Image: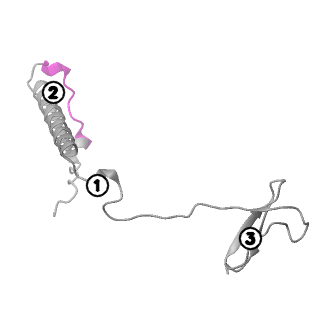
Amino acid sequence: MPTYEYRRPDGTTFEIVQKMADDALTVDPDTGVPVERVFHPVAIHFKGKGFHNTDYGTKRRNRELEASAKEGADKHDAKTADKAKAKAESSSGDAPKSDLKPKAKSDEKKPKPKPPGSKD
């Protein structure tokens, strides 16, 4: 049998177990004051395709997706080019050799960390 929640006029609530076929209470069985049933939203989760407007393909949506994909690729290409340019400038040898710091001996003996996913 389901449990129903009721609210008194002063804001306090109580629960009572009733059959689904029983009528809703109009007065509190303990005090005799008028009560009303409290309703709560039901938790429903729709899963799968077709439940959101973004799931439906339209010509406009396809154009927007293509434009955003192109912009993303352009931004990625620009960042990669900027990094390559900065690396080339730093290793071009413009700085005098006296400004470069010599490597510490402890750094030379340390094995370089292997990239993740390598099989050695």
**Three-letter amino acid code at the position of disc 1:** Asp
Asked which quadrant contains residue 16, the reply is bottom right
Left or right: where does residue 53 sit relative to residue 119?
right
| Residue 77 locus on image (x, y percent) | 13, 35
Pointer 2: residues within 10 angstroms few (<14), some, or many (20+)?
few
Q: Residue at x 78, y 69 (%)?
A: 25
Q: Which mark is residue 13?
A: none
| Residue 117 locus on image (x, y percent) | 20, 60
Q: Earlier in the sequence, mark 3 or mark 2?
A: 3
Q: Residue at x 84, y 53 (%)?
A: 10
**Three-letter amino acid code at the position of disc 2:** Ala
Q: Find numbered disc 1 in the image and state the secondary structure of the residue it sits on.
A: helix
Q: Find numbered disc 2 in the image and state the secondary structure of the residue it sits on.
A: helix
**Residue under numbered circle 3:** 24
| Residue 116 locus on image (x, y percent) | 22, 56
Circle 3/circle 1 CB separation < 8 Å: no
Pointer 3: residues within 10 angstroms few (<14), some, or many (20+)?
some
Q: Which of pointers 3 and 1 indicates the residue nearer the eye?
A: 3
Left or right: where does residue 20 sit relative to residue 56?
right
Say which quadrant the N terminus sits in: bottom right
**Residue under numbered circle 1:** 55
Pointer 1: residues within 10 angstroms few (<14), some, or many (20+)?
few
The mark tally for this picture is: 3
**Residue under numbered circle 2:** 86
Q: Find numbered disc 3 in the image and state the secondary structure of the residue it sits on.
A: loop
Start-end of magenta stretch: 95-106
Q: Which residue is nearer to you in this view: 29 or 66? A: 29
| Residue 33 locus on image (x, y percent) | 88, 62
**Three-letter amino acid code at the position of disc 3:** Ala
Q: Label 3 to label 1, Cα distance in Å? A: 42 Å
In the picture shown, does residue 95 fall above or below 108? above
Left or right: where does residue 100 sit relative to residue 24?
left
